[in-house]
Amino acid sequence: MANALAILPPSLIARAGVQSYNLGSVFEAPGAIFRRGDFLQKVTTGTITNVAPTGSISAVVPTAAPTVSSTGSAVSGTPITYYYAYYTYTNSGGSIESQPSPEFLIVNASGYKATVTVPVAGSPAAGQYFNLYVGLYPGTEVQQVAATALGSAATVPVPLTNSVGANRLTAGGTAVSAATVFGLAVDDYDVTYAPKSPVQFDNRSPFGIDTSTPPLGSYEQYQTKVVPLSAGLQFEMSLLQAWTPGLLYTTCGVSYQTAYNTFAADNTASTAFLTIQGKVGGNTFNPTYDDQGGFLDTGARVIVSVTTTSVLIL
């Protein structure tokens, strides 16, 4: 009689002297939610524009402190949020741009969008406007507001209009390839080495706080840890279809199983980037039942290997 086993999260295989795992770090996308063992993909929202110093003010480094108002623009239903930001000088057409200013913190009060005002004092004659770059963590800032006149207020979008980062692969059985993923999440979304703002302490700081950032420190403390999918890497997964020995060395993809909140190996997925290398042996003395899945059981634990290297290259 065939059994239906629960779909369990993917897990790494500890094999001393056989394989090792490299760890990578990626920034989470705003609002990201994922679990340990989930496949993470790159999520881009809006248009990503980074600082590009150019023209007659390309060497100018802004030093004027901006004025940040936490209650600049009333809006219903927004929670308190913390962002990191810097600004650059530019002209009305955006054809020239300075170096970025020192990084500063933006706090959006509950029910408001913050505003940022850069003073005219200390600005170059050719740069009487400013571009505002904002991100969820230090090092993630991208342009949110372009060419605001100096002395005028730029409203910070909530949520951010433009962002890029990691989140769980699209749910609902979508087939994916390794070319679209960063790798396997090592921890849940709310576990990192530092909080996302200097005034917040929660699961993001279980190991203490190190507030040093480049050039002396690293952004890694604000990132989530992943295992990149390098070709040949092996790990365990639950197989969505019924197990038979005929599935050995066949290819498969993955699909997200909402009933179990995790991913399963799926040999009907349209894009295959894994190869089934074997079935995990059971841990029972009962000859009629294999707790890791037996012949025609669904949810059997299988060993898969990666056939295509992921986008996260270490």
Image (tube, rainbow, N blue to C red):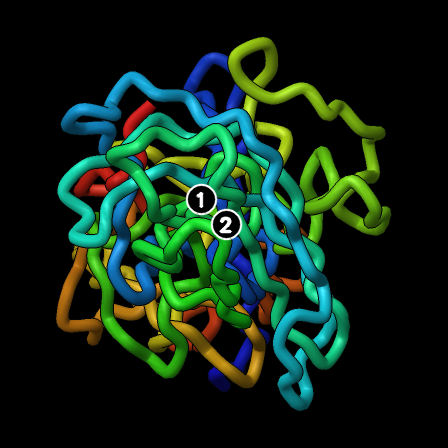
**Which residue: 34% across, 21% down?**
60
Q: Position of residue 161 (x, y in %)?
A: 40, 67
**Furthest residue in direction bottom, as rendered:** 76
Q: Is residue 25 above or below residue 203?
A: above
Identity, as a three-letter code, of the amino acid under mark 2:
Gly
Q: Are marks 1 and 2 in contact (CB under 8 Å)?
A: yes
Tell me the quarter of the picture where residue 145 sits: bottom left
Label 1 Cα neighbours within 10 Å, binned few <14 / some 14-19 / many ≥20: many
Q: Is residue 217 above or below residue 112?
A: above
Confirm whether residue 160 shows in the render: yes
Judging depth in this view, the residue of 313 and 92 nearest the camera is 92
Tell me the quarter of the picture where residue 270 sits: bottom left
Q: Quadrant of the C terminus?
A: top left
Q: Is residue 273 above or below residue 306?
A: below
Q: Secondary structure at mark 1?
A: loop
What distance separates the C-alpha of mark 1 from that of mark 2?
Answer: 4 Å
Identity, as a three-letter code, of the amino acid under mark 1:
Glu
Badge count: 2
Q: Provide the residue designation for mark 2.
A: 135
Q: Secondary structure at mark 2?
A: strand
**Which residue: 42% across, 19% down?**
18
Q: Is residue 308 left or right of residue 1?
A: left
Confirm whether residue 275 shows in the render: no
Q: Position of residue 184 (x, y in %)?
A: 45, 47
Tell me the quarter of the picture where residue 277 sits: top left
Q: Position of residue 238 (x, y in %)?
A: 46, 63
Q: Provide the residue designation for mark 1.
A: 141
**Which residue: 26% across, 41% down?**
310
Q: Is residue 1 above or below residue 57?
A: below
